[in-house]
Every structure is written in C-alpha cells, then in structure tokens.
Image (cartoon, grey):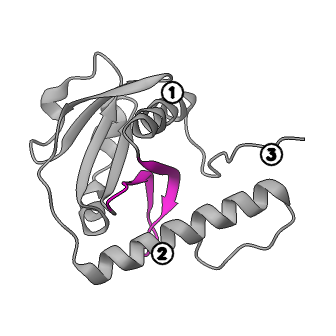
Amino acid sequence: MSAAPFLPTSPREPAALLLARGVCRAFDHLGYASLVEFPLASGRRADVLALGTGGELVIVEIKSSVADFRADQKWSSYREYADRLYFAVASGFPSALIPEECGLMVADAFGAAVLRDGRPTPLAAGRRRAVTLRFARVAAARLRRALDPEAGRLDGL
C-alpha cells in the first residue's frame, strides 16, 4: 500500500499544478526539500517553499499566465518569509514582466531552470527559526494525513 501524494487543497488550474511539480523536481536536484501551498503565518499561502541543507528558505510564486501575474500582487509580502523570492513561469512567458529583484525560473511538468537569481534578503534568526519549524510541522502533518486521512489538522497548518 502506498500513501497518496499531497495535493493542494486550494483550487488551482492544472497548468499551475504542473509548473509546481516541475519546480519541486528542480529543487530536489538542487538538494532542497519543498512543500507546495505552504501556509505562512500571515494567512497567505506560498505556492512553493523550499528549504536548503544550510537552512536557506526560498519561496517560488507560480504564474501560469500574464493575466495571473497581473491579477496577483500579494507576492511582495512573501519576502518576509524567505531569503530569496522567485517567479516560476512557463516557456514563452514575457520575462520582462518579472521584477528585477526577483529570481526567475522557467518550468514545465518535468523540471525547471533558473534563468536568474533574485536579490537575497536574508531573514532574521527568529523569523528563520519560526518558518523552519512551521515547515517541519506542515510536512509532518501532511505525511500523517497521507497515512491516515482522518487525522486531525493542526490549527493554522
């Protein structure tokens, strides 16, 4: 018996889910652990949060279309929760729309390539600890629910 994979609970279009899959695969190859639809303490959800072996935290905001990018400007608040912020887009997306201070990844369902690194904004030690602990608790809760879908949910996770 194998556990069912975690699927985001928020409604997302299939194209965005495939881009998230490719981004997570790329992070796997880079030695990062990643979670999709990560709940931030602010109440927002990051499309992907990745945790590196040295404790670095990276948020990736996935944009499946120009309309999606233009309709969503909440991404700037994600800087408070990660050392770097990236946008992941499909091939053909006009990269000039992505702010220069943000990293840029081009992704598909099978992987992603980093076209540019964003400007680093190192987290304060207390914030890093809080986000890292939240990462661990969210990952553990999702793994538990894969084993037992009836398991209780932790408040805020």
Q: Earlier in the sequence, mark 3 or mark 2?
A: 3
Q: Residue at x 30, y 60 (%)?
A: 56
Q: Which residue is mark 1?
A: 15
Query: Residue 88 placed where, x, y %?
Result: 33, 35
Query: In the image, which disc is placed on residue 3?
Result: 3
Q: What is the three-letter code of the residue carrying label 2?
A: Leu
At numbered mark 3, what does the secondary structure look like: helix, strand or loop? loop
Left or right of 155 on screen, residue 74: left
Q: Residue at x 41, y 52 (%)?
A: 50
Few, some or many residues within 10 Å of mark 1 (<14, 14–19, 20+): some
Few, some or many residues within 10 Å of mark 3 (<14, 14–19, 20+): few
Query: Residue 141 placed where, x, y %?
Result: 68, 66
Q: Which residue is mark 2?
A: 133
At numbered mark 1, what does the secondary structure look like: helix, strand or loop? helix
Q: Earlier in the sequence, mark 3 or mark 1?
A: 3
Residue bounds of the magenta highlight: 32-54
Q: CA distance from mark 3 to mark 2?
A: 24 Å
Residue sitting at the far bottom? 126
